[in-house]
Image (cartoon, rainbow, N blue to C red):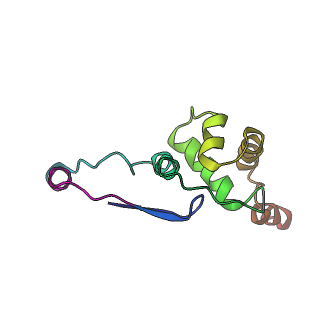
Amino acid sequence: MIAQEERIFDEHFLRRLTVDEANRIFMSAEWPVEFLSYERVLKTGHALRIRPCVFLDRHSPSLVWTVEDLRKERPDISVDEIALLLGVTATQTKRLLAAASSGKGSWWQRMRHRLGL
């Protein structure tokens, strides 16, 4: 089983399935839970002690999109939980959430807004 994470860690996570797990997937579409959500993939990265990437743009599209996706998957996720998953501060996370809700977060989003696109 493989999860490709290209926004925060830029890694591939692999896990060998047991015969029983493979049979459950084949027979009843019952998948192991590790990679069923983006939040779980990010938690896997942390569990493996992989360090999140450092972004020069504090409103990088990858950060803004990840905040949006985490909130869509689990609307009650806290600022502190998001900060931990992204490897940023709670203050930075609040700014990313504000940028995500305004649609003007990343350089590209701000430029599109200015151009009226």
**The magenta stretch spans residue 20:** yes
Decide if residue 95 is on the left or right side of residue 50.
Answer: right
Percent from the top left, x then y, of residue 93?
A: 72, 43
Magenta residues span 14-26
Quarter of the C terminus within the rendering = bottom right
**The magenta stretch spans residue 16:** yes
Q: Residue at x 28, y 59 (%)?
A: 16
Please say if 110 is above or below 88: below
Quarter of the N terminus within the rendering = bottom left
Percent from the top left, x then y, of residue 15?
A: 33, 58
Outermost residue, front side: 49
Determine the main secondary structure of the stretch shown in magenta: helix
Residue placed most toward the observer, 69 or 3: 3
Please say if 23 is above or below 116: above
Residue placed most toward the observer, 72 or 13: 13
The answer to whether residue 117 is visible is no
Q: Residue at x 29, y 48 (%)?
A: 32
Q: Residue at x 70, y 47 (%)?
A: 88
The answer to whether residue 5 is visible is yes
Which of the 4 image quarters holds residue 18? Answer: bottom left
Percent from the top left, x then y, of residue 80?
A: 65, 35
